[in-house]
Image (cartoon, rainbow, N blue to C red):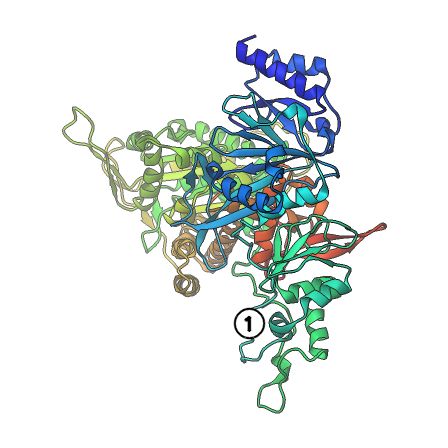
Amino acid sequence: MSESGSDLLRAALDYLDAGLSVLPAHLKLKYAAIRKWKPYQSRLPSHSEIGAWLKNGSDAICIIAGEVSGNLEMLDFDLAGEAFEKWCILVKEQSASLPDRLVIETSPSGGFHVVYRSEVPVCGNLKLAQRRESTDGPEPVVIHGKKYVPRKDTDGRWHIILTLIETRGEGGLFLCAPSLGYVVTQGDFRDLPVLEVREREVLLRSAWSLNDYFPEVIESTPTSHGNGMKRPGDDFNERGDIPSLLKKHGWALARPGENEYWRRPGKSKGWSATLKDRVFYVFSSNAYPFEANQAYAPFAVYALLENNGDFAEAARALRVEDYGEKAGTTDIDASTISCSTADEKQPDIIDPGPIPTKLLRIPGFVSEVMDYCLETAPYPNTVMAFCGALALQAFLAGRKVRDPGDNRTNVYLLGLGHSGTGKDWPRKINTKIIHEIGMADSLGEHFASGEGIQDALFGKPCMLFQTDEIDGLLQTINKAKDARHENIMSTLLTMFSASNSVFPMRRKAGKESPGAIDQPCLVIFGTAIPNHYYEALSERMLTNGFFARMIILESARRPEGQDPKLIEIPDRILEIAKWWSEFNPGTGNLEKWHPVPKVVEHISKAVEILAECRREAEAEYSKAEAKNDSVSTTVWSRVNEQARKLALLYAVSENHIKPVIGKGATEWGSLFAVHQAKRMLFMANEHVSENDFDAHQKKIIRIIRKAGGQLERRALSRKTQYLKKGERQEIIANLMDAGIIKQVPLPTRTKTGFAYKLSESVNVKENVND
């Protein structure tokens, strides 16, 4: 064991003998270095356990705060300890000798740890002093070596919250000396002072007085209705008697002043909240119905205490108490005056649900391939069978047919389904059919690079790429720092649009002419796990057209299995596939074939249906444009093109020899394309995030939605164990600030708990893929 390792072991054993729960730790991660450390929040480790842990070469040790270590609590001064000196001055003004009794150590980042024991149990971790700083956008900011991810407030401004002082309390842990970079400058961990309640309050109160940040205040509404009348809640916010209301419900004024300190019911000492400038700030985690570390406007306090959080009922009660302006005898229609506490907006993006089953069938070749796939698959999956069959038809007809607008059959299809739902079987069917007709060299699997895709299409201008887990490809492109991966995206975008023109190849070393690909037809049949795919998308992919070019179909839950059947490919399927392989309209021999695709005409009714689809897409585009919604404009701009491509595929599937784009083809193509656009936009809004904080918010919304729109607090905590407690509280507070979720009472056998409920402005329909 090294000298530093021996020092850690000696210190750990000394700390244990002093009654501290000490564990090995990761210096960089600042976390316990054993997998199951939670039991040591309630019991001390043994000497032999510590010896076994530290002989393996841990580079740090940590102490668990709380009752297990004798009610130990630590004040953590971050940001290079910039608030430490001010805090010391404040403490000395109230108790001159108290700072000299504390154990103090410095941290590697220049911060300070102040450590002591309390004569009474301590609460969990608390953020005592914070401040808000604005940023230029969502890009992460590094301050004193720590990365902060900005978030957007309700006014659309980006900011970060910096924590100057916080506690490590019950169940929390912190790294300590003699870990590298941690140095005790005063006192000894083996002889921690035990503070009286009033002394501990001096420390916490002094830290709290340095706080410059309050979360956005929970209030109910905008300040007025559209008719200009003041509502009861607005009126109470201005003149309601908050102190009397608090006392009525058992709260006690612990210390008067400009910033009043209030103590929750059931507590005889200390304080649990403050009241300043008519904002009630609660930091206690045991102050039901209030949330810890949350600020409340007067009307919110009234609604929670008097009406169990029912803001509409609270508004009605206040109107009886003569709050709010009355309609009188003016010409204002009193029936339009709502007592609701929030302007419940309809969701901007409504979920149309996964594609209806009736749209997963088109007549002819596609349905015949689907039927064969479903009959032979171990897990017959209609969505995947349709994707595979449509991709096969698109590939076979590539460079051979077009509609009067010169739209081609190249499509990018993506089937989403969880593992084991039968994603691979349609790929196997396609591969088998293509081998049978002698076109195996037109199959591809992996996108190694953009240049690789170009080279493959230069040799075979019409190709079907079948790739699994396309979300991995997107993640690679997102994280790529070299041009090779970035070029994949560029090539996929350009190939899609070049299907009715010529794609110029890059110039290669030693080659006089780079060459070109005449009317390339790249058909993609990809599969991925639903959530992984959407979370792998970036905002750039949503707006550069890649997302809009995709046709995305979602499989429901795993289908019931069946005994696999060894059935030969039906002769009719092979006959049609072979016919397509031999149908080569155009000029020149096979080596230098220049295709002149057959034009598949529309009937007059089909032209009208497509025109109506175009007008609908243009109207949606205009709405999105007015909102400056670049994602929606990108998606709706492709709907008309996608509808026409799909109608063309319907026609050639229905009759490969004499295809006509009729009423059925255009109705199906239009319905399919419009539904797809709406579903894709909803799913992107649900999953694609601007940063990690936004991603966590959206995941919590999905969790609550999946539970039916309401979830008990502890259940939500269990389902979000990947988040630290403070992170979870911050995310929930932000969702409540934005009116996305609200807190509702939930009576139990012993006491009243509470749950989080999605507001009516959030679509509560469960997503089958979550």
The image quadrant of residue 531 is top right
Residue at coordinates 54% horizontally, 9% vertically from top-left?
Answer: 2
Q: Secondary structure at mark 1?
A: loop
Q: Quadrant of the C terminus?
A: top right
Furthest residue to the front?
96
Give the amino acid type for the residue marked by disc 1 in the picture: Thr
Residue 502: x and y, percent?
24, 42
Eyeballing the image, is 187 above or below 648? Answer: above
The image quadrant of residue 740 is bottom right
Residue at coordinates 14% horizontally, 29% vertically from top-left?
Answer: 512
Eyeballing the image, is 181 above or below 619? Answer: above
Furthest residue to the left?
512
Residue at coordinates 53% horizontally, 77% vertically from top-left?
Answer: 226
Residue 459: x and y, percent?
29, 29
Q: How many C-alpha atoms fall within 10 Å of the one at disc 1: few (<14), some, or many (≥20)?
A: some
Eyeballing the image, is 7 above or below 338? Answer: above
| Residue 502 placement, left or right of 542 | left
Q: Nearer the viewer, residue 347 or 344?
A: 344
The residue to which callout 1 is attached is 223
Residue 175: x and y, percent?
58, 27
Visible residue check, residue 768: no
Residue 225: x and y, percent?
56, 76
Visible residue check, residue 285: yes
| Residue 509 placement, left or right of 415 | left
| Residue 642 placement, left or right of 333 | left
| Residue 597 placement, left or right of 374 | left
Q: Quadrant of the N terminus?
A: top right
Q: Nearer the viewer, residue 281 or 739?
A: 281
Q: Nearer the viewer, residue 96 or 373?
A: 96
Eyeballing the image, is 327 above or below 338? Answer: below
